[in-house]
Amino acid sequence: MGRKARRIAMSVARVTEIIASSPVSFDAAIAEGISRATKTLNNVTEAWVQSQKVSVTDGKASEYRVILKVTFVLND
């Protein structure tokens, strides 16, 4: 059959949950979560916010919390 077999590149990814917080903002909590995740996990490719929550103290937002789903590709 004279055709060369093509190799199909495949990868396997895993999703893990990260909970992060910041006294500043949701954006800061997200940045903190991603920063911390990439210190431990290799090949992080994306993250999405599953939920957001704010703690209130004396009628004011005192802490912003996020639950992130972080995707990373597993090494071969």
Image (cartoon, rainbow, N blue to C red):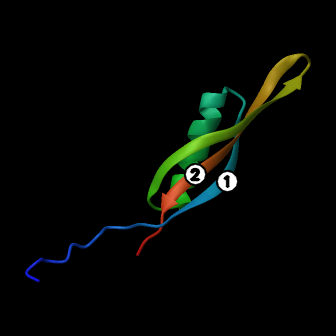
Q: Is residue 30 above or below residue 41?
A: above
- 37 left or right of 65? left
Q: Residue at x 41, y 66 (%)?
A: 11
Check disc 1 and report its element: helix, strand or loop.
strand
Extreme-right residue of the structure: 58
The answer to which of 19 and 36 lies nearer the viewer is 19
Extreme-bottom residue of the structure: 1
Q: Is residue 73 above or below residue 67?
A: below
Extreme-front residue of the structure: 1
Q: Earlier in the sequence, mark 1 or mark 2?
A: 1
Mark number displayed over residue 49: none
Q: CA distance from mark 1 to mark 2?
A: 6 Å
- 61 left or right of 17? right
Extreme-top residue of the structure: 59
Instruction: Check whether the beta carbons of the residues at disc 1 and disc 2 lie within 8 A of each other.
Output: yes
Q: Residue at x 21, y 72 (%)?
A: 6
Check disc 2 and report its element: helix, strand or loop.
strand
Mark 1 closeness class: few <14, some 14–19, many ≥20 residues within 10 Å = some
Assign the C terminus to one quadrant of the image. Answer: bottom left
Amino acid type, mark 2: Val
To which residue does mark 1 refer? 17
Residue 31: x and y, percent? Answer: 56, 38
The answer to which of 7 and 37 lies nearer the viewer is 7
Q: Is residue 58 above or below residue 48?
A: above
Residue 10: x and y, percent? Answer: 37, 67
To which residue does mark 2 refer? 70
Residue 65: x and y, percent? Answer: 74, 36
Mark 2 closeness class: few <14, some 14–19, many ≥20 residues within 10 Å = many
Task: Name the quadrant containing residue 68.
Answer: top right
The answer to which of 41 and 50 lies nearer the viewer is 50
